[in-house]
Every structure is written in structure tokens, then in C-alpha cells.
């Protein structure tokens, strides 16, 4: 037992001695010398933000001024009454700038040149064929094809060819100048120079002249109504617009925009409302304002003839409660050619058409549609659209049209 106790004591002594040596060795190890302080100051983190539960800093007393120490402005320094600043968000939008449309006479010269560029191929083709030394049957068939391609129509084409045959046979020799004169005379006869092509905008009574614009949507009907307002304003007439096309989205907005440009007011109603009611209100407002002309834009749906007849018939009846309807203009797209005649027949059966407006005439070489539609309806083409500009609507002049066809 004594030996065991002695062995334990010796072991403890050995362990203690070993720890002492290790610690002593660590103390003797040299630590690295600190470097010299840098010139850049050490940036310390800002103190932490106070959190909920932290004690607030004790309030410190600060000097405050009394009412006697505050300097108030004198009466001489107050030069005007204070005014409230207008909120730019709530302020009313600025009124649109009213444009001054180009006079009708000034537009015709520019539009003639544009018409000549689009229609010249027809006239040149006819003059080339007529200038052949021998006008055989094949040549006359080519002349017929040229006229039919230009949408002149079958019956007018046959009439024109027959007259040309007779006159060329009598004429004998054919110089270019003689052929041009001959063709010009026959085309003018075909177009008709005895039509009254003026747009009726004057009423025989004290009420304004009332013009109703009809046509299929997509032909430029609403745009034509707006352009016609510009033509009338340019001629010194005051205009009220009636947005009776309530079934086409944004039709009333489009017409109102046209009116605002020239200072013409637009009478409109809710989308899908009664067109006849709006037309009635437009004429009523035109009478109250003493306007010269009321232009009524109508819907152009063709899905059923019965619905179209009922709608346009009702508009016509309510307008005539104020006074006579002076003009009914049918808007047709010249680029549709013979398909436009189908539309024309439907509208002619529904309402008494008094004049035709051909739009996009500058975008087609089928100017013969002028002849075809006049022959179909028995009413004259009164206005033509020759571009997308606001002043690209002009009165139709047969002489200028034929001169554009066959060139100078």
C-alpha cells in the first residue's frame, strides 16, 4: 500500500514539472514588435442606434426667444396680397391652339399635282394606244381593258370606246395634240360638266345648314367630317359638329379633336347612345349659337340593311323637326373600286344621297371609279380626299381631274 501511494506522488510531481517547463518556454518566446502608427487615423464604427428600452438622454435646457424678440415684417415691406399657388396636378389643361386652315383656292394647285402623279398612267396608256398607226380590233380591246382596269365600269367604257371610234375615223390623221384634245373632250363628257358640285351648306330658313355624312366605317367618314369642318371654317363659316356615330369606339373623341383644332364645338353623348338624339341636340345647339353649318357624323354599320335604314331614317326625321336636311354626303374609299359601288347601292336605298366624297383618290390608279359611282347613283362627286393631311380635302373639278389624267 505504501508503494502505491509513493508511485502516485511521484507521478503528480512529474506532471507538475512538465507543465512548468511548457509555460516557462512560452514566456520566453519573443512576441513581434508593433509597427509604427500609420498617418491615416483609425476610423471607428459609430455608436449603435438606440433600441427600444434604452434610456433616453436627459433633456437639456435651450434658450428660447420671446414674442418681443421676434422681428415681424413692417407694412411697407408687404407690397401685395399673398396668393395661393396653383396645384399643377389639379390645374385645368391648357386650351388647344386653334389652327387657321388653308383657304380652298390655295389648296387646289397643290392637290392637282398630287392627283396627276397617281392618275397619269391611265391617260398615258390611252394616248399611247390611240397613237398607233393602225387602230385594229385588238387595239380597241386594249383600250377597253385599260378603262375597265381603271374601274370606269362596263357601260361607260363601251360608250366611250364607241365615241372614240367614230371621232378617230372622221378625224383621219391623228397628231398627239389632236388626240389629247379628243380624249379630253370625251372624258369630260363621260364625267359630266353640268352637275352642281357645290356642297349645300346654306339653309333657306333661319336655321343653320345641316349636312349629314354617311358611309361604311373604315372609308374615312369621321376624318372627312373633320376635314370638311376645316374647309368651311377656312371659308369663314362657323360650324357645330354632331358625333352621332356612337357605336364605334373613340369616334366621338376623334371628331372632337378635329373640331378643337379649328374652334368648332362637338355635341356628343354616351357611347352606345341614341344617334338620333345626338343629332337633334347638335342642330338645337347650332340654332342656339347661331352657327352657319351643322355637320353630323353617323354610324356606318352594314351588317343588316334593315337596322341601317331604321337608324339613318330616324336621324333624318328628328333633324327635319328643326328644318330641312340640306345635304347627305356618302363617303366612299376609292381604293375599293367596284366593291364601293355595292356599298353605295345600299346607302342609296336607305337615304337620299345628294353628293359623293371619294377618299384616298391619290392612293389608287383606278380613278375611273369617279365615272362609275356617278353613273350608278346619278349624283355628282363633290369632294375628293387626296392625302392624309388635315387640308387634303378639295372640291372635285372635272377639268382638273381630266387634265391630271392625260397630262399637259
Image (cartoon, rainbow, N blue to C red):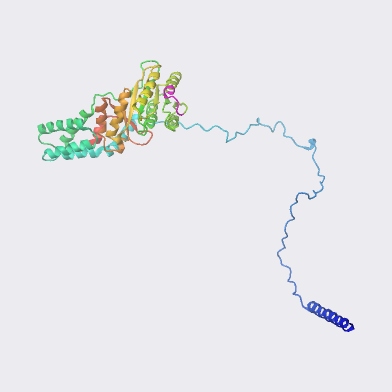
* Residue at image location 80% in from the left, 37% down from the top: 66
Which of 287/237 is in front? Answer: 287
Quadrant (top left/top right/bottom left/bottom right) for the N terminus: bottom right
In the rendering, at what x and y percent does residue 336 appear?
30, 35
Q: Residue furthest front?
A: 1
In reply to whether residue 120 is colored magenta, the answer given is no
Q: Is residue 296 above or below residue 403?
A: above
Q: Residue furthest top?
A: 205
123 sits left or right of 242 in the view: left
Question: Is residue 353 visible to us here?
Answer: no
Dividing the picture into quadrants, the one containing residue 333 is: top left
Magenta segment: 271-278
99 sits left or right of 385 in the view: right
In the rendering, at what x and y percent does residue 408 appear?
23, 37
Which of 52/211 is in front? Answer: 52
In the rendering, at what x and y percent does residue 303 appear?
36, 30
* Residue at image location 70% in from the left, 64% down from the top: 40
113 sits left or right of 273 in the view: left
Which of 340/132 is in front? Answer: 340
Q: Is residue 41 above or below residue 178?
A: below
Question: Is residue 4 visible to us here?
Answer: yes
Q: Residue furthest bottom?
A: 3
Q: Residue furthest right?
A: 2
Which of 166/269 is in front? Answer: 269
In the rendering, at what x and y percent does residue 266 appear?
45, 26
Amino acid at each position: 500500500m505504501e508503494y502505491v501511494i509513493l508511485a502516485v506522488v511521484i507521478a503528480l510531481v512529474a506532471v507538475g514539472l512538465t507543465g512548468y517547463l511548457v509555460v516557462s518556454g512560452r514566456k520566453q518566446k519573443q512576441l513581434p514588435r508593433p509597427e509604427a502608427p500609420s498617418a491615416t487615423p483609425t476610423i471607428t464604427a459609430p455608436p449603435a442606434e438606440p433600441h427600444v428600452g434604452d434610456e433616453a438622454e436627459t433633456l437639456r435646457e435651450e434658450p428660447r426667444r420671446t414674442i418681443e424678440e421676434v422681428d415681424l415684417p413692417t407694412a411697407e415691406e408687404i407690397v401685395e396680397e399673398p396668393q395661393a399657388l396653383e396645384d399643377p396636378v389639379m390645374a385645368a389643361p391648357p386650351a388647344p391652339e386653334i389652327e387657321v386652315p388653308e383657304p380652298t383656292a390655295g389648296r387646289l394647285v397643290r392637290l392637282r399635282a398630287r392627283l396627276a402623279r397617281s392618275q397619269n398612267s391611265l391617260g398615258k396608256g390611252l394616248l399611247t394606244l390611240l397613237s398607233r398607226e393602225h387602230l385594229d380590233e385588238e387595239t380597241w380591246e386594249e383600250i377597253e381593258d385599260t378603262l375597265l382596269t381603271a374601274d370606269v365600269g362596263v357601260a361607260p367604257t363601251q360608250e366611250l370606246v364607241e365615241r372614240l371610234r367614230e371621232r378617230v375615223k372622221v378625224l383621219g390623221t391623228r397628231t398627239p395634240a389632236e388626240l389629247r384634245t379628243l380624249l379630253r373632250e370625251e372624258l369630260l363628257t363621260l364625267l359630266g360638266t353640268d352637275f352642281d358640285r357645290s356642297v349645300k351648306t346654306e339653309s333657306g330658313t333661319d336655321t343653320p345648314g345641316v349636312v349629314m355624312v354617311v358611309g361604311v366605317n373604315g372609308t374615312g367618314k369621321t376624318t372627312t367630317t373633320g376635314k370638311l369642318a376645316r374647309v368651311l371654317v377656312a371659308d369663314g363659316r362657323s360650324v357645330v359638329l354632331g358625333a352621332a356615330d356612337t357605336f364605334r369606339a373613340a369616334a366621338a373623341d376623334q371628331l372632337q379633336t378635329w373640331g378643337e383644332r379649328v374652334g368648332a364645338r362637338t355635341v356628343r353623348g354616351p357611347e352606345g347612345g341614341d344617334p338620333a338624339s345626338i343629332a337633334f341636340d347638335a342642330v338645337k345647339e347650332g340654332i342656339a349659337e347661331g352657327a352657319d353649318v351643322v355637320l353630323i357624323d353617323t354610324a356606318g354599320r352594314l351588317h343588316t340593311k334593315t337596322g341601317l335604314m331604321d337608324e339613318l331614317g330616324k336621324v333624318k326625321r328628328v333633324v327635319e323637326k328643326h328644318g330641312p336636311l340640306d345635304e347627305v354626303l356618302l363617303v366612299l374609299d376609292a381604293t375599293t373600286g367596284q366593291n364601293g359601288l355595292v356599298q353605295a347601292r345600299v346607302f342609296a336605298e336607305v337615304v337620299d344621297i345628294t353628293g359623293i366624297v371619294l377618299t384616298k383618290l391619290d392612293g389608287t390608279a383606278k380613278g375611273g371609279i369617279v365615272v362609275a359611282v356617278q353613273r350608278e347613283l346619278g349624283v355628282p362627286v363633290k369632294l375628293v380626299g387626296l392625302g392624309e393631311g388635315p387640308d387634303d380635302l378639295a372640291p372635285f373639278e372635272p377639268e382638273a381631274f381630266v387634265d391630271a389624267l392625260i397630262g399637259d
